[in-house]
Image (cartoon, rainbow, N blue to C red):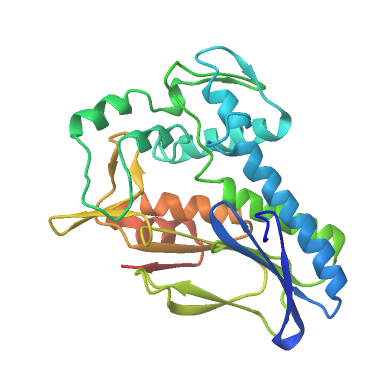
Amino acid sequence: MTSSRSVKVEARANGIMAVSFQAMASPCEILFHTADAALAARTGRAAADEVWRIEAKYSRYRPDSVIGRINASAGHPFSVDAETAGLLDFAQNCYQLSQGMFDVTSGVLRQAWRFDGSDDVPDPALVERICQRVGFGRLDWRNPVLTMLPGMEMDFGGLGKEYAADMALGVVDAMAGVPALVNLGGDLCCNRPPPGGSWQVGVERPDRERMPARVLELTGGALATSGDTHRFLLKDGIRYSHILNPQTGWPVPGGPRSVTVAALSCVEAGMLATFALLQGDQAEVFLQQQGVPFWCLW
Protein backbone atom coordinates (compact mmCIF):
# COMPACT_ATOMS: atom_id res chain seq x y z
CA MET A 1 0.00 0.00 0.00
CA THR A 2 1.31 3.49 -0.86
CA SER A 3 1.51 5.83 2.11
CA SER A 4 0.50 9.47 1.81
CA ARG A 5 3.92 10.14 3.34
CA SER A 6 5.85 8.17 0.73
CA VAL A 7 8.28 9.45 -1.87
CA LYS A 8 9.08 8.01 -5.28
CA VAL A 9 12.56 8.25 -6.77
CA GLU A 10 13.24 7.79 -10.48
CA ALA A 11 15.99 8.55 -12.97
CA ARG A 12 15.13 10.82 -15.87
CA ALA A 13 16.90 11.99 -19.01
CA ASN A 14 19.90 14.34 -19.00
CA GLY A 15 21.26 13.25 -15.65
CA ILE A 16 18.20 14.21 -13.59
CA MET A 17 16.93 12.32 -10.55
CA ALA A 18 13.31 13.09 -9.59
CA VAL A 19 11.73 12.69 -6.17
CA SER A 20 7.93 12.96 -6.18
CA PHE A 21 5.35 13.03 -3.38
CA GLN A 22 1.95 14.44 -2.48
CA ALA A 23 1.48 17.43 -0.17
CA MET A 24 -0.88 20.38 0.26
CA ALA A 25 -3.45 18.72 -2.04
CA SER A 26 -0.92 18.92 -4.89
CA PRO A 27 1.54 16.73 -6.78
CA CYS A 28 5.04 17.74 -5.73
CA GLU A 29 8.43 17.05 -7.24
CA ILE A 30 12.07 17.82 -6.58
CA LEU A 31 14.54 17.50 -9.45
CA PHE A 32 18.25 16.97 -8.81
CA HIS A 33 21.06 17.12 -11.32
CA THR A 34 22.97 14.13 -9.98
CA ALA A 35 23.62 10.48 -10.77
CA ASP A 36 23.57 9.64 -7.05
CA ALA A 37 20.16 8.06 -6.46
CA ALA A 38 20.84 7.62 -2.74
CA LEU A 39 21.66 11.32 -2.36
CA ALA A 40 18.49 12.31 -4.20
CA ALA A 41 16.36 9.90 -2.14
CA ARG A 42 17.84 11.02 1.18
CA THR A 43 17.63 14.73 0.40
CA GLY A 44 14.24 14.49 -1.30
CA ARG A 45 12.79 12.71 1.70
CA ALA A 46 14.14 15.36 4.08
CA ALA A 47 12.72 18.14 1.91
CA ALA A 48 9.35 16.36 1.71
CA ASP A 49 9.38 15.99 5.50
CA GLU A 50 9.85 19.75 5.76
CA VAL A 51 6.90 20.38 3.44
CA TRP A 52 4.74 17.94 5.43
CA ARG A 53 5.82 19.63 8.67
CA ILE A 54 4.67 23.02 7.41
CA GLU A 55 1.45 21.54 6.03
CA ALA A 56 0.60 19.95 9.39
CA LYS A 57 1.58 23.02 11.39
CA TYR A 58 -0.49 25.50 9.37
CA SER A 59 -3.39 23.41 8.05
CA ARG A 60 -6.77 25.00 8.66
CA TYR A 61 -8.29 21.50 8.57
CA ARG A 62 -6.45 20.22 11.67
CA PRO A 63 -7.68 21.31 15.10
CA ASP A 64 -4.22 20.52 16.54
CA SER A 65 -2.38 22.80 14.08
CA VAL A 66 -1.23 26.28 15.03
CA ILE A 67 -3.93 27.71 12.74
CA GLY A 68 -6.55 25.40 14.23
CA ARG A 69 -5.66 26.49 17.76
CA ILE A 70 -5.57 30.18 16.79
CA ASN A 71 -9.02 29.85 15.23
CA ALA A 72 -10.33 28.17 18.37
CA SER A 73 -8.92 30.88 20.67
CA ALA A 74 -12.28 32.73 20.57
CA GLY A 75 -10.99 36.18 21.40
CA HIS A 76 -8.40 35.09 23.98
CA PRO A 77 -4.72 36.10 23.62
CA PHE A 78 -2.67 33.40 21.90
CA SER A 79 1.15 33.28 22.03
CA VAL A 80 2.84 32.04 18.86
CA ASP A 81 6.31 30.66 18.16
CA ALA A 82 8.97 32.57 16.23
CA GLU A 83 8.23 30.93 12.86
CA THR A 84 4.53 31.76 13.08
CA ALA A 85 5.33 35.28 14.25
CA GLY A 86 7.47 35.79 11.15
CA LEU A 87 4.63 34.65 8.90
CA LEU A 88 2.17 36.93 10.72
CA ASP A 89 4.54 39.87 10.30
CA PHE A 90 4.79 39.07 6.60
CA ALA A 91 0.99 38.79 6.32
CA GLN A 92 0.62 42.14 8.05
CA ASN A 93 3.07 43.74 5.63
CA CYS A 94 1.14 42.25 2.69
CA TYR A 95 -2.11 43.59 4.12
CA GLN A 96 -0.66 47.07 4.44
CA LEU A 97 1.12 47.08 1.05
CA SER A 98 -2.03 45.89 -0.72
CA GLN A 99 -4.24 48.40 1.11
CA GLY A 100 -6.21 45.59 2.68
CA MET A 101 -6.64 43.46 -0.45
CA PHE A 102 -4.27 40.64 0.64
CA ASP A 103 -5.80 39.41 3.88
CA VAL A 104 -5.11 36.12 5.67
CA THR A 105 -8.36 36.50 7.61
CA SER A 106 -10.46 36.27 4.42
CA GLY A 107 -10.48 32.46 4.40
CA VAL A 108 -13.67 32.55 6.47
CA LEU A 109 -15.44 33.53 3.24
CA ARG A 110 -15.28 29.85 2.24
CA GLN A 111 -18.38 29.53 4.44
CA ALA A 112 -20.23 31.26 1.59
CA TRP A 113 -18.20 30.30 -1.48
CA ARG A 114 -17.59 26.78 -2.85
CA PHE A 115 -15.48 27.04 -5.98
CA ASP A 116 -16.37 23.64 -7.40
CA GLY A 117 -17.18 24.58 -11.00
CA SER A 118 -20.93 24.71 -10.32
CA ASP A 119 -23.34 27.65 -10.62
CA ASP A 120 -23.89 27.91 -6.85
CA VAL A 121 -23.28 31.65 -6.34
CA PRO A 122 -23.98 32.59 -2.70
CA ASP A 123 -26.61 34.93 -1.34
CA PRO A 124 -25.20 38.49 -1.20
CA ALA A 125 -26.64 38.94 2.28
CA LEU A 126 -24.64 35.94 3.54
CA VAL A 127 -21.44 37.28 1.97
CA GLU A 128 -22.04 40.67 3.59
CA ARG A 129 -22.53 39.11 7.03
CA ILE A 130 -19.33 37.06 6.77
CA CYS A 131 -17.37 40.11 5.63
CA GLN A 132 -17.98 41.59 9.06
CA ARG A 133 -15.58 38.93 10.38
CA VAL A 134 -12.81 39.72 7.87
CA GLY A 135 -9.98 42.22 8.25
CA PHE A 136 -6.39 41.94 9.47
CA GLY A 137 -6.85 45.43 10.87
CA ARG A 138 -9.36 43.97 13.35
CA LEU A 139 -6.68 41.76 14.88
CA ASP A 140 -4.57 42.73 17.86
CA TRP A 141 -1.12 41.51 16.81
CA ARG A 142 1.66 42.35 19.23
CA ASN A 143 4.47 39.91 18.58
CA PRO A 144 4.35 37.21 19.92
CA VAL A 145 0.73 37.56 21.12
CA LEU A 146 -2.24 37.48 18.75
CA THR A 147 -5.82 38.24 19.76
CA MET A 148 -8.65 37.73 17.26
CA LEU A 149 -12.26 38.69 17.64
CA PRO A 150 -14.60 35.71 18.16
CA GLY A 151 -15.78 34.34 14.82
CA MET A 152 -12.70 35.47 12.91
CA GLU A 153 -10.36 32.91 11.33
CA MET A 154 -6.75 32.80 10.19
CA ASP A 155 -5.81 31.02 6.95
CA PHE A 156 -2.27 30.81 5.55
CA GLY A 157 -3.49 29.15 2.34
CA GLY A 158 -2.43 32.18 0.32
CA LEU A 159 1.23 31.87 1.28
CA GLY A 160 1.79 28.43 2.86
CA LYS A 161 2.72 26.48 -0.28
CA GLU A 162 5.15 29.15 -1.45
CA TYR A 163 6.76 29.30 1.99
CA ALA A 164 7.08 25.51 2.03
CA ALA A 165 8.77 25.56 -1.40
CA ASP A 166 11.37 28.06 -0.21
CA MET A 167 12.01 26.07 2.97
CA ALA A 168 12.31 22.79 1.04
CA LEU A 169 14.90 24.34 -1.26
CA GLY A 170 16.85 25.40 1.83
CA VAL A 171 16.92 21.78 2.98
CA VAL A 172 18.10 20.65 -0.45
CA ASP A 173 20.86 23.26 -0.54
CA ALA A 174 22.10 22.33 2.92
CA MET A 175 22.14 18.57 2.27
CA ALA A 176 22.97 18.06 -1.38
CA GLY A 177 24.72 21.07 -2.86
CA VAL A 178 23.75 20.10 -6.41
CA PRO A 179 21.54 21.95 -8.93
CA ALA A 180 17.94 21.38 -7.89
CA LEU A 181 14.41 22.56 -8.55
CA VAL A 182 11.48 22.31 -6.13
CA ASN A 183 7.98 22.16 -7.61
CA LEU A 184 5.03 22.19 -5.20
CA GLY A 185 1.94 22.04 -7.36
CA GLY A 186 3.24 24.63 -9.83
CA ASP A 187 4.98 26.92 -7.35
CA LEU A 188 8.67 26.52 -8.09
CA CYS A 189 12.09 27.60 -6.93
CA CYS A 190 15.61 26.54 -7.82
CA ASN A 191 19.13 27.16 -6.57
CA ARG A 192 20.92 27.10 -9.94
CA PRO A 193 20.54 25.53 -13.39
CA PRO A 194 21.86 22.16 -14.49
CA PRO A 195 25.19 22.39 -16.33
CA GLY A 196 24.95 23.94 -19.76
CA GLY A 197 21.26 24.72 -19.63
CA SER A 198 18.25 25.78 -17.59
CA TRP A 199 15.21 24.26 -15.92
CA GLN A 200 12.37 24.05 -18.45
CA VAL A 201 9.08 25.08 -16.83
CA GLY A 202 5.69 24.89 -18.52
CA VAL A 203 3.02 27.50 -17.74
CA GLU A 204 -0.35 25.80 -17.81
CA ARG A 205 -3.08 27.02 -20.12
CA PRO A 206 -6.09 28.37 -18.19
CA ASP A 207 -8.36 25.46 -19.03
CA ARG A 208 -8.88 21.91 -17.86
CA GLU A 209 -6.58 20.32 -20.44
CA ARG A 210 -3.44 21.12 -18.40
CA MET A 211 -1.41 21.74 -21.55
CA PRO A 212 1.43 24.29 -21.40
CA ALA A 213 0.72 27.67 -22.94
CA ARG A 214 4.43 28.43 -22.99
CA VAL A 215 7.71 27.05 -21.67
CA LEU A 216 9.94 29.26 -19.53
CA GLU A 217 13.61 28.83 -18.71
CA LEU A 218 14.49 29.15 -15.04
CA THR A 219 18.12 29.52 -13.96
CA GLY A 220 17.59 30.81 -10.41
CA GLY A 221 14.97 32.21 -8.08
CA ALA A 222 11.31 31.28 -8.23
CA LEU A 223 8.08 31.21 -10.21
CA ALA A 224 4.56 31.24 -8.80
CA THR A 225 1.24 31.12 -10.61
CA SER A 226 -2.17 32.21 -9.38
CA GLY A 227 -5.43 31.90 -11.27
CA ASP A 228 -8.89 30.39 -11.59
CA THR A 229 -8.12 27.36 -13.78
CA HIS A 230 -9.30 24.81 -11.23
CA ARG A 231 -11.34 26.83 -8.73
CA PHE A 232 -14.26 28.86 -10.05
CA LEU A 233 -18.05 29.10 -10.42
CA LEU A 234 -19.88 29.59 -13.70
CA LYS A 235 -23.40 31.03 -13.82
CA ASP A 236 -25.30 32.72 -16.65
CA GLY A 237 -22.10 32.92 -18.68
CA ILE A 238 -20.21 34.71 -15.88
CA ARG A 239 -17.09 33.05 -14.48
CA TYR A 240 -16.48 33.73 -10.78
CA SER A 241 -12.82 33.42 -9.79
CA HIS A 242 -11.77 32.13 -6.36
CA ILE A 243 -9.66 35.29 -5.93
CA LEU A 244 -11.91 37.28 -3.59
CA ASN A 245 -11.77 40.93 -2.66
CA PRO A 246 -11.72 40.63 1.15
CA GLN A 247 -13.36 44.03 1.50
CA THR A 248 -16.46 43.06 -0.49
CA GLY A 249 -16.36 39.26 -0.26
CA TRP A 250 -16.82 38.97 -4.05
CA PRO A 251 -14.49 37.90 -6.86
CA VAL A 252 -12.43 40.60 -8.52
CA PRO A 253 -13.82 41.00 -12.08
CA GLY A 254 -11.99 41.64 -15.32
CA GLY A 255 -8.61 40.19 -14.45
CA PRO A 256 -6.48 37.62 -16.27
CA ARG A 257 -7.29 33.93 -15.96
CA SER A 258 -3.81 33.29 -14.59
CA VAL A 259 -0.71 35.26 -13.63
CA THR A 260 2.83 33.85 -13.37
CA VAL A 261 5.53 35.94 -11.70
CA ALA A 262 9.29 35.42 -11.39
CA ALA A 263 11.02 36.66 -8.23
CA LEU A 264 13.92 35.85 -5.92
CA SER A 265 11.77 33.68 -3.65
CA CYS A 266 8.58 31.70 -4.09
CA VAL A 267 6.88 33.67 -1.31
CA GLU A 268 7.62 36.94 -3.10
CA ALA A 269 6.52 35.56 -6.48
CA GLY A 270 3.27 34.21 -5.01
CA MET A 271 2.53 37.45 -3.20
CA LEU A 272 2.96 39.49 -6.39
CA ALA A 273 0.88 37.06 -8.48
CA THR A 274 -1.99 37.30 -6.00
CA PHE A 275 -1.63 41.07 -5.70
CA ALA A 276 -1.86 41.30 -9.48
CA LEU A 277 -5.08 39.26 -9.71
CA LEU A 278 -6.59 41.47 -7.03
CA GLN A 279 -6.04 44.41 -9.40
CA GLY A 280 -8.53 43.02 -11.94
CA ASP A 281 -8.02 44.50 -15.40
CA GLN A 282 -5.07 46.53 -14.09
CA ALA A 283 -3.03 43.41 -13.31
CA GLU A 284 -0.44 43.95 -16.03
CA VAL A 285 -0.05 47.64 -15.18
CA PHE A 286 0.57 46.70 -11.55
CA LEU A 287 3.22 44.12 -12.44
CA GLN A 288 4.96 46.48 -14.84
CA GLN A 289 5.24 48.94 -11.95
CA GLN A 290 6.89 46.25 -9.80
CA GLY A 291 9.61 45.67 -12.39
CA VAL A 292 9.40 41.86 -12.27
CA PRO A 293 9.12 39.37 -15.13
CA PHE A 294 5.54 38.17 -15.50
CA TRP A 295 3.21 36.34 -17.87
CA CYS A 296 -0.56 36.90 -17.92
CA LEU A 297 -3.04 34.61 -19.65
CA TRP A 298 -6.50 36.05 -20.33
Q: At which x and y percent is residue 153?
A: 47, 27
Residue 77 as seen in the image, left or right of residue 191: left
Residue 118 as seen in the image, left or right of residue 187: left
* Nearer to the camera, 284 or 172: 172
Up/down of 99 relative to 161, above or below: above
Q: Quadrant of residue 259?
A: bottom left
The residue lying furthest to the top in this view is: 76
In the rendered image, the quadrant that contains the N terminus is: bottom right
Q: At which x and y percent is residue 171?
A: 79, 55
Residue 5 as seen in the image, left or right of residue 242: right
- Residue drawn at (57%, 39%), measured in percent from left and top? 59
Up/down of 172 relative to 129, above or below: below
The residue lying furthest to the left in this view is: 236
- Residue drawn at (41%, 27%), measured in percent from left and top? 135
Q: At which x and y percent is residue 132?
A: 32, 23
In the rendered image, the quadrant that contains the C terminus is: bottom left
Q: At which x and y percent is residue 218?
A: 62, 74
